[in-house]
Image: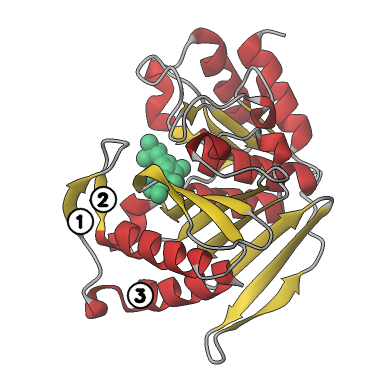
Amino acid sequence: MAIAEGSRRIQLQVQQASLADVLGSTGETNVQGEIVQRLDAASSDIFVETLSQSGHVAAIGCEEIEDPVIVKGEAADGYIVLMDPLDGSSNIDVAVSIGSIFGIWQKRPDETVNDASLLRLGNEQVAAAYVVYGSSTVLVIATKDNVCGFTLDPESGSFAVTHPNIRIPAECPYYSTNEGNNKVLDESTRKAITLLRDKYSQRYVGSLVADFHRNLLKGGIFAYPADVNRTDGRLRLMYEANPLGYVAEQAGGAASTGYQRILDIVPKQLHQRTPLILGNKDVVEETVSVISGS
Ligand code: AHG
Ligand code: MN
Ligand code: MN
């Protein structure tokens, strides 16, 4: 409910954009060394507020906040939420779909939550969720063996079930990758991308959540592999790859670095990056076997 309420408030700002004077950058750079857009900061503030006030969240990790937020007071379920509050920042000012991403863990029994409590294995998530602010606003929530989609009714401000029991289709019409990086890929990765290009149609929004949501519903694979400039990849493990990897697996898909399952990576720090091959299980496995030569 805290995520739903936060995304309802963000959608209002996304919709009004320039009219509400929420576009453009803050002029700050975040821990990633990236320029913070005003909507990045606004989304971070909104979700920290709704999650902290929920009475169920013990700690929050956020792409836009360097250190963990340890929530004061009682947290009934002791959830730990790691989030990318606004994904696809380069698309905010040009009215292209953007999103929010959440990985949800539960603190260990009688654990006193501290910074280290946020560095949990992806395969210990109890749930994951994302929101796409697109032609409609869709909230997708994954729990064990169940992925369910809800659509926001802008009139009432409430979400209704519209995509019960999402399963990623067996067919794979699309591949999503930044073809501009091909010149900096290593040999085996470039071969893997060539195989995708030869087989599938290219769809690349530049907002991970939008690319993933289309692939989840219609079938497809997303690839942001390591390259010579980004040996650890570009996307963040804890609040992009882990949550969407969890959603993908619960819907029958897969998520890999190109060498190992995303959800098996032992995290070392909150903002670490990872290569990400995500989507239809068979195609991810084929792509991984070419990249890793396995
Ligand atoms: P964020 O806006 O949270 O920094 O995420 C942007 C990410 C992801 O959404 C997208 O897939 C990727 O950046 C696009 O990267 P390129 O512009 O390098 O293709
Ligand atoms: Mn992102
Ligand atoms: Mn972001």
Is the Cβ of the residue at disc 1 closer than 8 Å to that at disc 3? no
Looking at the rendered structure, which numbered label has been put on residue 13? 3
Is the Cβ of the residue at disc 2 closer than 8 Å to that at disc 1? yes
Q: Along the polypeptide, which appears first: circle 1 or circle 3? A: 3
Q: Is label 2 in a helix, a strand or a loop?
A: strand
- Quadrant assignment for the N terminus: bottom right
Q: Is residue 196 above or below residue 158?
A: above
Q: Is label 3 in a helix, a strand or a loop?
A: helix
The count of marks equals 3
> Which one is nearer the viewer's eye here, 85 or 211?
85
Determine the residue positioned at 70% across, 48% down: 247
For the residues labelled 1 and 3, the Cα–Cα distance comes to 15 Å
Q: Is residue 252 above or below residue 210?
A: above
Determine the residue positioned at 58% across, 63% down: 74
Q: Along the polypeptide, which appears first: circle 2 or circle 1? A: 1
Is the Cβ of the residue at disc 3 closer than 8 Å to that at disc 2? no
Looking at the rendered structure, which numbered label has been put on residue 25? 1
For the residues labelled 3 and 2, the Cα–Cα distance comes to 16 Å
Instruction: Name the residue carrying label 2.
Output: 36
